[in-house]
Image: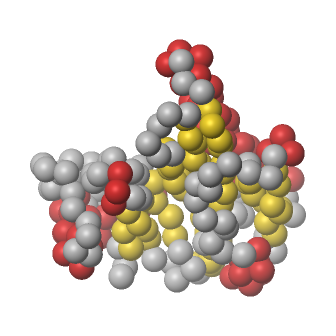
Amino acid sequence: MRKIFLTVALTLMFALQNFCSAAVTIETANFNGSENLVYPIVHTGDAQVDEKINGAIVAELKNFFKGCHYAVQYDGREIGGMQTNFEVPCNRAGNTVILSIVLTESVYYKGAAHPATYKHALNFHAETGDKMNLGYLTEVGDGSNPKFSLDNVTKKLREYVDKHEEIFLFNEVLPLKSLPEDFYFDENLHVHFIFQQYEVAPYAVGIIDLDMDA
């Protein structure tokens, strides 16, 4: 089966090194026993927290599988291969433990020119299991944090494109009309926005990972 994307970018050892102060461990599991369907199981030492975090991870995977099988049932497509994988950038910020998990989900439909690949980020307070959505960055969604305003993210995306000659965006993408739904924190607590394939640029450009603190 054709290879669709790279293996886990950050090893378990690296994740544990960054997150050891929170006593969080990450177990790699295979969905339905398939070596191509990989996902994380989080252990915090608190069963209720684990249930919230792992429940959110499984829910995201189920959405991916549901979408694939919907295409088979209603669009007449035939799946040639599926893969999932994950990265775990994580850190401690003050007294708040931040756990970011980036799930990569990819499906190839027979006859298609290329696979469809997406990256979805899940961010948690590891001490409570609560998800940190976009409102966490923009102060409950009111847009008052200038760092993550549409103007500033548009500026950073322009700078990113200017630095990479091979990258070009669709017409009328800029200025941005809304922030990307997916973001995560890296090991240095930099915030990254994820622009999916076809979201702002052609497929050949790939997924754009915009480091807001670069």
Q: Nearer the viewer, residue 129 or 6?
A: 6
Task: Report the side of 11 relative to 142 (left or right).
Answer: right
Q: Which residue is rendered at x = 63% and y = 78% of the image?
A: 92
Q: Nearer the viewer, residue 188 or 204?
A: 204
Residue 58 x %, y %: 72, 43
Task: Report the side of 23 relative to 111 (left or right).
Answer: right
Number of marks drawn? 0
Q: Is residue 212 visible?
A: yes
Locate the C terminus and report the quarter of the image it occupies.
bottom left
Q: Quadrant of residue 78?
A: top right
Q: Nearer the viewer, residue 72 or 80?
A: 80
Residue 145 x %, y %: 30, 65
Residue 126 x %, y %: 69, 63
Residue 183 x %, y %: 46, 60
In the rendered view, would you say 43 is above or below 80?
Answer: below
Q: Which residue is rendered at x = 59% and y = 22% of the image?
A: 72
Task: Report the side of 112 relative to 96 (left or right).
Answer: left
Q: Which residue is rendered at x = 33% and y = 60% of the image?
A: 205
In the rendered view, would you say 82 is above or below 188?
Answer: above
Q: Which residue is rendered at x = 52% and y = 54% of the image?
A: 119
Applied colour scheme: secondary structure
Residue at the top extreme, as displayed: 74
Q: Is residue 125 visible?
A: no
